[in-house]
Amino acid sequence: MKNIQNKWIRAAIPALLLHCSIGTVYCWSIFSQEIANYIGFSKSATEWAFSFAIFFLGMSAAFLGNVVEKNIHRSSLIAAICFAAGMAGTGFFIWYGGKQFATTGHGSVLALIGIYICYGFIMGIGLGTGYLSPVKTLMLWFQDRKGLATGLAVAGFGAAKAIASPIMQALLDSLGEGGIYKMFLILACVYFVMMFTGHLLLAKPADWHEPASQEKGARAIDVIKTKPVVFAGIWLMFYINITCGLALISQEKMIIKCIGLAGMAGVLSSITAVFNAGGRLGFSAWADTMKDRNTVYKIMIILSIVATGLVIATRGIANMGQSTPLLILVLILLFVVNAGYGGGFSNVPTLLSDHYGMQNISAIHGITLSAWAIAGLTGNQMASFIVGHVGNMVEVSDGHGGVTLVNPVGYQTVLYVTIVLYAIALLCSFFLVGGKKKTKEGK
């Protein structure tokens, strides 16, 4: 009973506290326009703060993976401090930018750069270290259900948006003038308490001993070099899955409006968030029953190719969902891509452990997350470029008695690119990653 209790107190609960906090980075769309309006800059200018946050998440995970490997208490404390400090700093620079804009009528470049540094760089470090810190610990506590354990934590990261979005919106509505910066300061305190509690609780099993001497001193990059083709395949497969996911998810709200469901945009966004979180937990738990965890990637990618291909064949978005079957196909596409996007995150650490063992897994996982960093800069921008240069804007109802501009041909064209990328990812899964290889640990 004590062992079961410790699994939850020392691994699962602290992992959820950490991931449910840092996962709120995906709430950016809730308040990005508010920030832009308050400090006097365009939304496109402030959007870079989110891109930088995802970039530094991946890069800090890649470069600080060894810190996590050596001491999860140090890394989880770094995560709590950096995430909370970055959020508080963002609130401060929003306040400063709003003050300057109200006084001069012009946006303050210093405030914008401060937001980039705080939300992008400082929070990014907290994101990367916080994301990595509980993963190996979970796999050690749940040896027989590694996928379920990592999926539970990563699902917390995905579900954070669904949980925090209404809370943030309520704060914005109730805090009055300057509510946007007040919200950041309040949440900085809340998330620091949550993450610090997770930091205090997080611990590896008492009977786990890191490999000694020469093997313990091996660098993650040296371990990767033992199977460089496999790692390249996992990295590319992971990168493409994130890029395609972000390309579609970044346009999700406008696609929903484009097919005539603007009035249900909020509800449907919550449903897609559930599929995102469900994919993280469901696909990883399912992978525990498979001899080869790479099989679950094949399944996720094939489902994404089929769903994308059906919408391409029927021109479901370009035809603006003119019939119920077309509407259903487009919604299925959004649900499937969200689930596969989430599942890609939760399955990568266990897939890596199948090929490289548990030794240095935090550092190897961190290097793999550099794919997330690069995809964070390319996925959204690729979709935005296509939508901005292909097709024409047309007016549709915004669901509130007004109109909004959408580009049905542009959104449809994004699918032509993503289906090709998904096909490449599938080839990587079959021919580069291959089947499970027995590790030195015999697992």
Image (cartoon, rainbow, N blue to C red):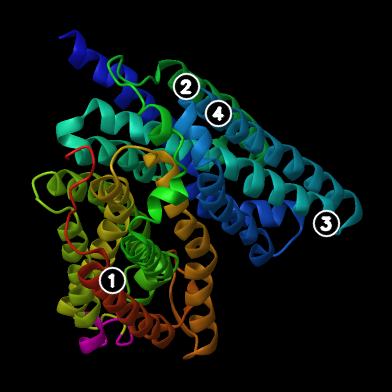
**How far apart are the two marked residues, 1 and 3, measured between alpha carbons?**
43 Å
Q: Amino acid under label 1? A: Cys
Q: Quadrant of residue 294?
A: bottom left
**How far apart are the two marked residues, 2 and 3, measured between alpha carbons?**
36 Å
Q: Would you call the spot at circle 3 few (<14 residues within 10 Å), some (14-19), or many (20 or more)?
A: few
Q: Are marks 1 and 2 in contact (CB under 8 Å)?
A: no
Q: Are marks 4 and 1 in contact (CB under 8 Å)?
A: no
Q: Find residue 386 and report its horizontal and vertical position in percent.
A: 49, 83
Rendered position, 279 above or below 212: below
- Between disc 4 and disc 3, the foreground one is 4
Circle number at residue 428: 1
Farthest-out residue, front: 214
Q: Which quarter of the image is occupied by the N terminus?
A: top left
Farthest-out residue, bottom: 391
Circle number at residue 80: 4
Instruction: Give the mark nearest the N terminus, 4 or 2.
Output: 4
- Between disc 2 and disc 3, the foreground one is 2
Q: Which quarter of the image is occupied by the C terminus?
A: top left
Task: State which region is magenta.
Answer: 311-319
Q: Are marks 4 and 2 in contact (CB under 8 Å)?
A: yes
Q: Which residue is mark 3?
A: 109
**Residue at horizontal 23 percent and vertical 70 percent from the top:** 304
Q: Amino acid under label 4? A: Ala
Task: State left or right for residue 399 relative to residue 172.
Answer: left
Instruction: Give the mark nearest the N terminus, 4 or 1.
Output: 4
Circle number at residue 382: none
Q: Is residue 313 magenta?
A: yes
Q: Which residue is mark 2?
A: 199
Task: State left or right for residue 337 relative to residue 265.
Answer: left
**How far apart are the two marked residues, 4 and 1, measured between alpha carbons?**
36 Å
